[in-house]
Image: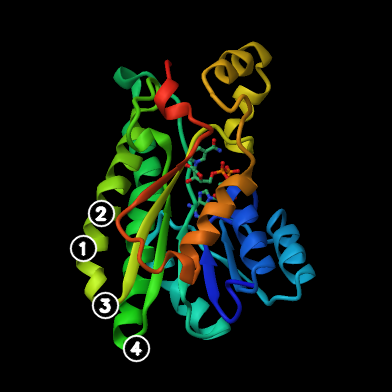
Amino acid sequence: MRLAGKRAVITGSGRGIGRAIAIRFAADGADIVINDLNVQGEALQTLAQVEAHGRRGVLIQADLSQTDQTRRLIDEAFAQLGPIDVLVNNAGIEKRSPFADVREEDYDLVLDVNLKGAFFTTQAFVRQLIAARRPGKVIFISSVHEELPFPGFSTYCASKGGMQLLTRDLAVELGPHGITVNGVAPGAIATEINRALLDDQPRVARLLEQIPLGRMGKPEDVAAVAAFLASSDGDYVTGSTYYVDGGLAWNYRE
Ligand SMILES: NC(=O)c1ccc[n+]([C@@H]2O[C@H](COP(=O)([O-])OP(=O)(O)OC[C@H]3O[C@@H](n4cnc5c(N)ncnc54)[C@H](O)[C@@H]3O)[C@@H](O)[C@H]2O)c1
């Protein structure tokens, strides 16, 4: 159990990729803080599956588009579970709009959740680590669209592009504190964020033609790479982003 004795905060883990990471980390021996906007519904299923692995799970509601709530999440996580070793910045949203029609409120929401939220959650976590002189690991769940254009999703691309360089920058700045910072960039994963795509079979068929491995990814595919980065197997890895995309990035046409 390569995460035995570890404690992890996983944002947006009520469902989807975040839930799969929570369950995988618990299976590998970690206790888990499950965060989401609402922790009464789907998040209870994440909690049940964490506990089914014999691990401790704690539910903490926080809207990470609000900086004060990113700080409260980290404070409550340390208070309820003890010193946290791993932060996974997974919460994320996307909004489709032609660039010319993007509304300022949608820009603000996507950037506030995907980039500003991850930024200040990480800052609160890192402050705790540095004060206690403890090492730790930060993982950003980015996207192949930190690198690849995604027409109609300019706000999403701006947020994930920012996350790409934040990963590299923090790896350099936080390395001397024993804190690693890495990214995981999923391709097309079958989750609710892709509901419109999943309900459009001709579009799915066109997409599959671009994925060399011939299938969409599962949340568990992403969780497996996050578990490696969270474990001591990843101790000498920092400033890297791992693509989990079945080869899509090298074969992508929008
Ligand atoms: N599914 C994919 O194909 C794919 C591809 C690349 C990257 N990603 C990234 O993976 C991450 C997870 O996506 P997913 O596919 O599991 O989506 P999802 O919509 O199934 O899950 C996202 C979770 O984040 C939560 N969330 C949203 N806003 C929040 C906020 N303000 N505060 C706290 N929690 C919030 C949601 O409630 C939800 O539970 C996102 O960052 C997404 O950009 C997903």
Tell me the distance, in whole angstroms, between the alpha carbons under discs 3 and 4.
11 Å
- Please report the residue visible at 25 percent of the width from the left and 48 percent of the height from the top: 165
Indicate the quadrant where residue 250 lies.
Answer: top left
Indicate the quadrant where residue 154 lies.
Answer: top left
User: Mark 1 sits on what residue?
Assistant: 172
Instruction: Work out whether residue 17 or residue 5 is closer to the camera in this orientation and state it.
Output: 5
* Secondary element at tag 1: helix
Indicate the quadrant where residue 134 lies.
Answer: bottom left
Quadrant (top left/top right/bottom left/bottom right) for the N terminus: bottom right
Tell me the distance, in whole angstroms, between the alpha carbons under discs 1 and 4.
20 Å
User: Mark 2 sits on what residue?
Assistant: 168
Dots 2 and 4: beta carbons under 8 Å? no
Of callouts 2 and 3, which one flags the residue occurring earlier in the amino acid sequence? Answer: 2
Dots 1 and 2: beta carbons under 8 Å? yes
User: Mark 4 sits on what residue?
Assistant: 132
In-image side of 221 versus 109 (left or right): right
Of callouts 1 and 3, which one flags the residue occurring earlier in the amino acid sequence? Answer: 1
Please, is residue 225 above or below residue 39 in the view? above
Q: Of the numbered discs in the image, which one, if any, rests on residue 143? A: none
Q: Position of residue 162 (x, y in %)?
A: 28, 45
User: Mark 3 sits on what residue?
Assistant: 177
Instruction: Work out whether residue 59 or residue 140 is closer to the camera in this orientation and state it.
Output: 140
Quadrant (top left/top right/bottom left/bottom right) for the C terminus: top left
Three-letter residue code for mark 2: Arg
